[in-house]
Amino acid sequence: MRRVSLLLLVTLLIFTLAGCGGTAVENDGKIDSNSVQSVEGVMGQYVGQIDSNSVEIIIDGEPKAFRTDGLDFDFTALQSDEWVEISYIENQYEQLEIKAIELINN
């Protein structure tokens, strides 16, 4: 009888511990579309290049850094204080990425 009770207790303990284990959530590297916010047609004043992958633009009086990875635009052609219109997103790393830029002719 003692052996059966011990076996039953061990089996119950195994099932209890197995029930506590959860499944791991796997990230397959895809971007959650809910975590990316898009902004269209914002005007700002170009300040200059921060480095080869970033520029600074003043929007609503606040200087902001924008990533320029993958953007086909010659930023060396822009002068400081020129007005531009940009479309950008905030990526999953909370970085602002320019998706389109256009010089505004005054």
Image (cartoon, rainbow, N blue to C red):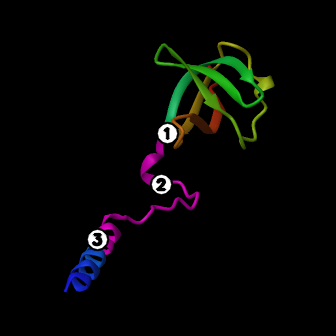
The answer to whether marks 2 and 1 mark residues whose Cβ atoms lie closer than 8 Å is no
Q: Amino acid at mark 2?
A: Asp
Residue at 70%, 13% in the rendered image = 80
Image quadrant holding the C terminus, namely top right
For residue 32, the mark is 2
- Magenta part of the chain: 13-39
Q: Residue at x 53, y 40 (%)?
A: 89
Q: Which residue is drawn at the image coordinates 55% and 38% (left, top)?
A: 88
Mark 2 or mark 1: which is in front? 2
Which quadrant is the N terminus positioned in?
Answer: bottom left
Task: Tell whether position 99 is magenta.
Answer: no
Q: Position of residue 8 (x, y in %)?
A: 24, 81
Nearest the viewer among 87 and 32 is 32
At label 2, counting other C-alpha atoms closer than 10 Å, the crowd grade (few under 14, some 14-19, many 20 or more) is few
Reply above or below: 45 against 96: above
* C-alpha gap between disc 1 and disc 3: 58 Å
Q: Which residue occupies the foreground of this view, 94 or 52?
A: 94
Residue 2: image location, x then y, percent: 21, 81
Residue 5 vertical position relative to residue 85 in the rendered view, above or below: below
Q: Earlier in the sequence, mark 1 or mark 3?
A: 3
